[in-house]
Amino acid sequence: MDSFTAITLAVFLPFILAGILPAIEKLLKDKIGWYASAIAFLSLLLIAQAAPEIIHGKTIQSSIEWLPSMGINLSFYADGLSVMFGFIVSGIGVIIMSYSNGYMSKKEDLPRYYQQLLFFMGSMLGMVFSANTIQLFIFWELTSITSFMLIGYWRNRPMSVYGATKSLLITAAGGLFMLAGFLVLHAITGTYDIPTILHSESMREMILGHELFIVALILILIGAASKSAQGPFYIWLPNAMEAPTPVSAFLHSATMVKAGIYLVARIHPIFSGTEAWFILVSGVGIFTMLLAGFLAFRQTDIKGILAYSTISQLAYLMTMYGYTTHHEPGIGVAAATFHLLNHATFKACLFLVAGIVAHEAATRDITKMGGLHKEMPITFIVASIGALSMAGIPPLNGFLSKEMFYESSVEMGALLGSPYNILIPALAVLGGVFTFAYSIKLIDGIFLGKRPSKGLPKHIHEPPIIMLAPAMFLAGLIILFGLVPSLPVHNFIDPAVSGILLEETHLHVKLWHGFTIPLIMTIITFALGILTYTQYTKIAEWQNRFNARYPWISVNYYYDAAVDNARNVTSKFSNRMQPGPLKTYVLALLLLTIAMFAIPAILLASSLIPGNLNFDIPPYESIIFLFMVVLALGAAFLPRYLPAIISLSGLGYLVALLFIYLQAPDLALTQILVETLSTIIFLLAIAKIPQKFKEHIPRKTLVRDLLISVTVASMIFIMLINATQGIVPPFESLSHYFIEKSLPLAGGHNIVNVIIVDFRGYDTLGEIAVLCLAAFGVYNLINSRGDDQ
Amino acid sequence: MTTLITKTVAKICLPLVILFSISLLLAGHNNPGGGFIGGVMFASVIALTYVAYGLDYIKSFFDPDWSNWFGFGLLLASVTGFAAIAFSHNFLRSAVEFVHLPFFGEVELVSAALFDIGVYFVVIGGLLSIFKNVGDDK
């Protein structure tokens, strides 16, 4: 199998195999989770199949035609960066879905859960391997949608619904900004193809020099920031913690939230090396890193702490990718890429531990916990490895990448000169101090310390091995990457960094690299971190007081106000637009028709009614018309429903008769049938309502309605005369084409039918789909109304 | 509505109309008819029976889930479209074949007929599921 096929399959197999998951569920019952993890493993193998070539410096690109006329194809591009992401997504996917077998109760709706997880995984893989911006956007929004569904997995919990809506509003809207950015990029370069832009020096220079450069950059970065919960957009991530914990571990720490980081890395070669890049990316990054790290203190929910820590860690990555100068565009790229991988391991590990603790202790409130290391010694060790790695303790992998973070901060500061040579490293250390403090809090608060007298169940024990093993595996990776850094660096980081910087790079990461400035910074971090930890509770209390006193200093405050307002305004609007009675809608439609017709009618007033009309109507048609008029009047004026309906159906049948005279048998047949069916429905309806028109219509309304009807009718009259008597410039009739081609092209004598099923088959397919949807709509309308009563 | 007249009419109509609707469906490619017309005809006569005998009475011995019908129809129509892709033509491209069968003589087999059968089922299923849902509504 060639690499392109492998990548394509890795993306699409999860979708296809998830599609048949409900059928497999009938066989496997509650073991269905293993089927899902097997699919994830299959994707992992497929990516691994394509990986060796890429690790040796090649890139894969190929495409299948999709919308060739618009320059949009289904195309995949695999370089070191996308392969590293591919490994993270599918690898963590295997771990999470195996873990879910223990975490998710057998009573839950498992097929829906695993199906959405797999859809997410496929979308995410599709996103990282996308070679063109439109395709990237589609997969990007698919990850937002699947994330929305997974956050809202417990549909009847109001907080789940709130969190899901919030994440969708923010990330999907951000995606639209990103799309706008891609369109600007297309306007500059004339292509949607990412590798084309990446590998063309002249195109990149053209973008840098273009006046729309800053517009494209800002729009795309809004997309990245909203997805990765950066800057003011961070607010959705803490609420996303309402999702089941494996989902949080997978989507909201290890993979989906890194989509924004991926985007930043992907466009790094295009936009970096400019001041705007540094200010926007690093600026937002540093701000978010400090804010989120600080805000983590007042969280009492374990997952809340982890959410803020994720935001802060993602901000590290942003900051590092933002370090750039004109001569050295990628100062922090290697550090960021390494930290990205490390963060995926230790944060997923911590989330899995949070799930275990919540599962066993039946609460996630850290204030109720303490001293759990006695009952859960293995979980305690695993959690400590994860948290200490996050805190940056040697010899774990988090230590290595944080050293690199400090190193790149020092380098960036030095290049900018005073006062930045002090400021940037100082801010980096401050970020590290916060991280250290809340990491220690996780260990101390849950596993050490004194346990409050109540709040926890009496018997707490280690979780089943299904849940423990994935977390232990990740903890093993943390130690392995820490002790043998050349392993991940050689296989993942070097190719990925080469993919971003577009040149071959070889990093040398060692555990002990001498007594350097970063090491001193680490020691300062630990010292200050311990100091901060002693004040942890005080800081948290101060934050709570501050929040209670100034509720308006918070992004959430404005988000909630905006959403509430939007809800009020739209409900007022729709109440006004849709008051209920059908009559109002018909009235609005007719008035609109009059308005649409009135404009050309006034403009063409002189020639509106042609002088020489041909009123040569055969006598039998005149008789039919006469009957039609009588029946129409009957339908309007008869005082009871039954005679009125009979009049109306009679009118319909006469129209059918007219069609027969005009030699249109198909039309006549259809008319008769539809008339019959609607008569039956009418009859059914009147059986349930009073037999007399009781409604008293005021004279004013009557006059108004009469006026409107007469106007519309005369309009139609004028329009038909103009259309049929050749006043409107004649168009070439289409029927000749169909009459000629029907038999040779489609083998049918009945042109009407051939048009329906063959020439315009696509339309028909759309129409029958609409009919199906209408049937579903009616079903839902009737059944959902039943619930209220 | 459950009068003797409607009941008798419905009873006589039912088999005739169903047969006629099938013949309309199959004849559609060369003579007046087709999936849509045939489907509406089928749906009308079932609806008439529902009205004549009362929904509850009919449901006690004949109660198909009409939503399966339109699901099947839509699937059939889409599969016909995708089958064309499998033979590396454009979506929904139809194929015509003339074969000689004993008794029937020369018979025209056209893939568009399958599509039309899909339309037929969607129309029946869609109309009747709406009809039944509304009728069931208390």
Image (spheres, coloured by chain):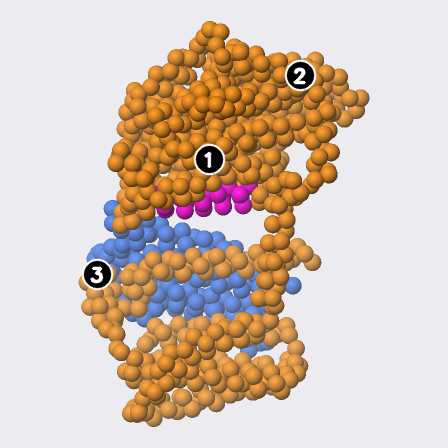
Rendered residue at 70%/18% (across/down) = A534
Q: Which mark is residue A745?
A: 3
Q: Quadrant of residue A49?
A: top left
Residue B20 image position (x, y, % from top left): 39, 68
Pointers 1 and 2 within a single chain: yes
Q: Which residue is mark 1?
A: A280
Q: Is residue A169 magenta?
A: yes
**Closer to viewer: mark 1 or mark 3:** 1
Residue A16 image position (x, y, % from top left): 41, 38
Q: Is residue A274 magenta?
A: no
Pointers 1 and 3 within a single chain: yes
- Precedes in sequence: disc 1 or disc 2: 1
Q: Amino acid at mark 1?
A: Leu
Q: Determine whether A657 is above or below A426 in the image.
A: below
Query: What colour denotes chain A?
Result: orange
**Left or right of A67, for residue A254:** right
Per the model, the C-alpha gap separating discs 1 and 2 is 32 Å
| Chain for numbered disc 2 | A
| Chain for numbered disc 1 | A
Q: Which residue is mark 2?
A: A531
Q: Amino acid at mark 3?
A: Leu
Q: Which residues are magenta?
A: A167-186
Residue A590 image position (x, y, % from top left): 49, 76
